[in-house]
Image (cartoon, rainbow, N blue to C red):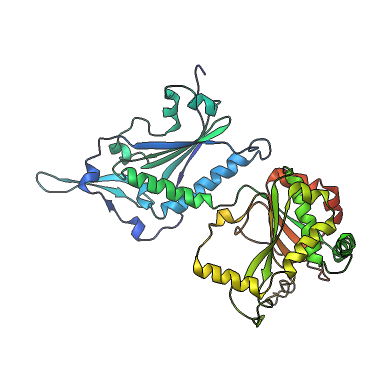
């Protein structure tokens, strides 16, 4: 590319999310810090591929991503608050006078860390293919060629996010008197962790199923099952329909393994059983497993029976076996690795007395949930407000998968109008 250009889209300043009296106090440097006043800022950054479908499937991807970055920077600055300040120099009255350089962390003295959104018509290949690093890369960083002393008037931390045609470059410039290489990457990783565990860009929708619709699904699933019995429950039939419908919406390869996980209450499955009033965590998950092609070539009854067998097969022996295994090798799973984007996870329960919570205000109008545990394929089950066995499913999917699910006639035929539809 002959003359690549970088266009400034927007810029703003970000302050720590929370402040205390301690964070407003002056922050003094060591001699090793001050010795670098004439050095340049440390400037390092990472080039990423833009997520597949980020432009076509979600036109708001970049705006949402930038908001996430800014929110997580604000949280990270709670722990690295001097980076939101400005350098200041104080002259005393001695003869000859001496000077004290420090960081003024008072929010009123500094607008905060700088955040820039820029864009270019370059591609990832334009950056990585040349033998020599193209000079345009310097434009991916703010504070080009400034020295640390300029931190009296310039931000001590500046983040520039440059959007390429098929990539994203996140450039970080930090005043060298504030950090060395170890501290720089400690900050960068701390910021990344606060952003990493945010839910991916998802659509979230409540699908309502009337008691009549649920009854039809249960009858159909039992009639189609090998046993032709009444063993399959309403929730197992509904979960099977959702599992099949989401798998179809994702257009997974036939050989791709897909799982339907269902949260299960261990209280009554233990021997002797726990009281229903036991207060604490007493749940695990059971699962139905099938290749995507195998799942979709069978009928609803086949999938529902997989889930039924998983539920009835979960006994005291399984619970105690898991506990013994955990004591032998304790582990704490990472949240972001628990949820498989090729599977679904059914959580919560329509059996909980959720609309019994009234506070003297009468029956609640609707149930909604917060940020927690929002991942691709996570489903929360609620009782329908009208009761009688109706169920609401809170479904989280990427925009393209949600659109495909909403276009599935079989699934949408089972969905009912809610009182607020």
For residue 204, above or below residue 174? below
Q: Residue furthest left?
A: 95
- Horizontal and vertical percent position of residue 380: 70, 61
In depth, the one of 102 and 320 nearer the eye is 320
Q: Residue furthest top?
A: 2
Tell whether 65 sits left or right of 193: right
For residue 276, above or below residue 404? below
In depth, the one of 362 and 83 nearer the eye is 83
- Horizontal and vertical percent position of residue 203: 68, 49
Residue 408 appears in the rendering? yes
- Horizontal and vertical percent position of residue 73: 46, 48
Residue 415 appears in the rendering? no
Tell whether 129 sits left or right of 44: right
Q: How many marks?
A: 0
For residue 127, above or below residue 324? above
Tell whether 20 sits left or right of 396: left
* Location of the C terminus (image quadrant): bottom right
In depth, the one of 420 and 202 nearer the eye is 202
Residue at screen point 85% across, 56% down: 414
Q: Quadrant of residue 25?
A: bottom left
Residue at screen point 72% across, 75% down: 356
Residue at screen point 71% across, 74% down: 361
Residue at screen point 70% across, 46% down: 256
- Horizontal and vertical percent position of residue 251: 74, 43
């Amino acid at each position: 590319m002959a003359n690549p250009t970088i266009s400034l889209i927007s810029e703003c300043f970000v302050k720590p999310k929370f402040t205390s009296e301690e964070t407003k106090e002056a922050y003094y440097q060591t001699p090793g810090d001050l010795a670098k006043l004439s050095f340049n800022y440390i400037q390092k950054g990472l080039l990423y591929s833009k997520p597949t479908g980020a432009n076509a499937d979600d036109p708001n991807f970049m705006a949402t991503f930038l908001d996430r970055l800014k929110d997580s920077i604000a949280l990270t600055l709670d722990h690295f608050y001097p980076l939101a300040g400005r350098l200041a120099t104080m002259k005393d009255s001695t003869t000859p006078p001496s000077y004290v350089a420090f960081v003024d962390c008072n929010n009123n003295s500094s607008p905060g860390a700088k955040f820039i959104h820029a864009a270019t018509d370059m591609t990832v290949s334009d950056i990585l293919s040349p033998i020599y690093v193209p000079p345009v890369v310097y434009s991916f960083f703010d504070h080009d060629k400034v020295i640390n002393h300029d931190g009296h008037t310039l931000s001590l931390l500046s983040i520039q996010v440059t959007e390429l045609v098929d990539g994203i470059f996140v450039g970080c410039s930090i005043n060298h008197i504030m950090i060395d290489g170890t501290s720089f990457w400690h900050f960068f990783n701390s910021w990344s962790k606060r952003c990493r565990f945010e839910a991916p860009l998802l659509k979230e929708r409540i699908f309502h199923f009337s008691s009549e619709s649920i009854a039809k699904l249960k009858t159909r699933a039992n009639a189609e099952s090998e046993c032709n019995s009444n063993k399959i429950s309403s929730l197992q039939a509904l979960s099977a329909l959702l599992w099949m419908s989401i798998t179809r919406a994702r257009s997974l390869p036939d050989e791709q393994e897909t799982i339907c996980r269902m949260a299960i209450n261990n209280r009554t499955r233990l021997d002797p059983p726990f009281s229903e009033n036991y207060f604490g965590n007493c749940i695990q998950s059971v699962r139905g497993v099938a290749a995507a092609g195998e799942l979709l070539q069978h009928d609803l009854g086949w999938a529902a029976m997989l889930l039924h067998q998983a539920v009835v097969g979960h006994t005291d022996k399984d619970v105690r076996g898991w506990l013994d295994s955990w004591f032998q090798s304790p582990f704490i799973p990472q949240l972001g690795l628990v949820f498989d984007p090729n599977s679904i996870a059914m959580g919560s329960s329509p059996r909980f007395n959720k609309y019994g919570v009234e506070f003297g205000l009468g029956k609640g109008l609707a149930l909604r949930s917060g940020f927690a545990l929002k991942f691709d394929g996570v489903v929360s089950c609620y009782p329908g407000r009208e009761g009688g066995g109706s169920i609401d499913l809170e479904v989280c999917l990427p925009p393209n998968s949600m659109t495909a699910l909403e276009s599935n006639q079989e699934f949408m035929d089972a969905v009912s109008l809610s009182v607020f539809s």
